[in-house]
Image (cartoon, rainbow, N blue to C red):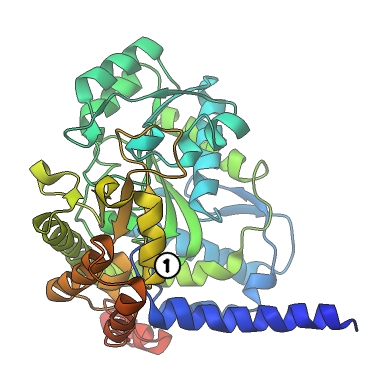
Amino acid sequence: MEDAFLKLALGLLKASEDHERYRGEECINLIASEGLKSPAVAEMLDKSHDLESRYAEGENDLKGHAKARHYQGQKYMTKIEDYSTDLMKSLFDCNWADVRLVSGTHANLATFKGISLATKNNRMVVLPLSAGAHITHDYSGLAGRVLGLETINHAYNIDELNIAIEKSATIIEATRPGIVTFGGSVFQFPHPVKELAQIAKDNGAYVAYDAAHVLGLIAGGEFQSPLKEGADFITASTHKTFPGPQGGVILANCEDERTKKAIKKVQHAVFPLSASNTHLGRLPALGLAALEMKVYGKELAKQTIQNAQVAAKCLSENGVNVLGKKNGFTKSHQIVVDVREYGGGQKLAFSLEDANLILNKNLLPYDNQHNRGDPSGLRIGFQDVTRRGFKPKDVECICSLMLDVIKGKRTSAEVKKDVIKLRQDFNEIKYCFQSVGEAKEYLQKHV
């Protein structure tokens, strides 16, 4: 074989090993969109080698169960999918779910497409990107460029960091969209679903809530309950605050002809329109993560939010502009800080990365929406460190290290040594089962 080819393979193996050490052992992860699987969930994934090689395309029924599959050898695969579906339905107290989605983006694609097929209406009311919408909601992303939807922005109250209820109600009534969305990638406070859902429905729209970031907080009962507040669909990733394997999910209640019509179209948008092989190897791990959240979810969600609030208060008291102060900074897992006076989001994200403090730059509501390369802010999430066992005093230590970099008190190289040392004190994942065997013992004791 050619030496160049072998060198590529060797480089791949080394980079993989380096990554596991670097991000898994030496960094403090504060990216709000990344979760942390438990040892039991990771073990369950490792036990699904055959399943991850298999294929199961077909239609589902209105319970979210496999109705027809177009390959043989699926008698256990169907059970696995149905059990995972029912665990998610039970956890979120709804009667329909689809677990075939391979990501949160895929969940949005299928939901937006399905609803637009049901309504024959291509208008969608969304948050502006600078106010926290995910790129999939935007005219410049999946909604506009792939699905051809016309996006209309919610009115947004910068002082409250939330959707402006009365003005958005007027927008919904005036434009009569087919979809009204809530949720997104950056939102520190629950969105006014309860206040706007009926107005949306009265004007012919379905309500979609993107819970990719807050699904674990919803599971723990510590954020808001979108379906109970009037959302028709929840779309989400299963690997952020919900600490499962990478994938997606859609949740809903199939209650009447209106919702049944939309669910059928959403299922059609999953298969055959946007998926064939749905990465079955993740489903046992997804179901196990649902069990963990049933047992530990409330405690985990509560501690995650507390840690985020402690960090916000600490940074604010040390002169950093943390958004949302008038409302307690945050009620979710994430905070947002304006760092223009310290060089801007891009500069500081790189400086903090050099110190092994991993987070990301982010647009702020008052930023130019097109200036994504160098926005004013940083987004900081606390779900990873919380699951590693960090409590408020430990979070204050993280903030102290961040402040050293932000304010230029020490070099990133100097801070990095302390980051690695602090990280080494947190090597056990909490709020979970430590093995599949431990999960089985729990079930045998409680069933």
* Residue lying farthest to the right in this orientation: 1
Q: Residues within 10 Å of mark 1 (few under 14, many from 20)?
A: many
Q: Nearer the viewer, residue 244 or 77?
A: 244
Horizontal side, residue 117 vs residue 213: left or right:
right
Q: Picture coordinates of residue 89 (x, y %)?
A: 38, 55
Q: Picture coordinates of residue 377 (x, y %)?
A: 31, 47
Q: Picture coordinates of residue 140 (x, y %)?
A: 54, 32
Q: Nearer the viewer, residue 443 or 315?
A: 315
Whether residue 133 is situated above or below residue 243 in the rendered picture: above
Point 39% across, 55% down: residue: 347
Question: Dot 1 corresponds to which residue?
Answer: 244
Point 69% across, 80% down: residue: 11
Q: Picture coordinates of residue 312 (x, y %)?
A: 16, 57
Asked whether residue 192 appears in the rendered view, the answer is no
Horizontal side, residue 268 vs residue 369: left or right:
right
Q: Secondary structure at mark 1?
A: strand
Q: Quadrant of residue 221?
A: bottom left
Whether residue 230 is situated above or below residue 332 in the rendered picture: above
Amino acid at dot 1? Gly
Asked whether residue 416 appears in the rendered view, the answer is yes
Point out the image quarter for the N terminus.
Answer: bottom right
Point out the image quarter for the C terminus.
Answer: bottom left
Point 59% across, 45% down: residue: 270
Q: Nearer the viewer, residue 420 or 132?
A: 420
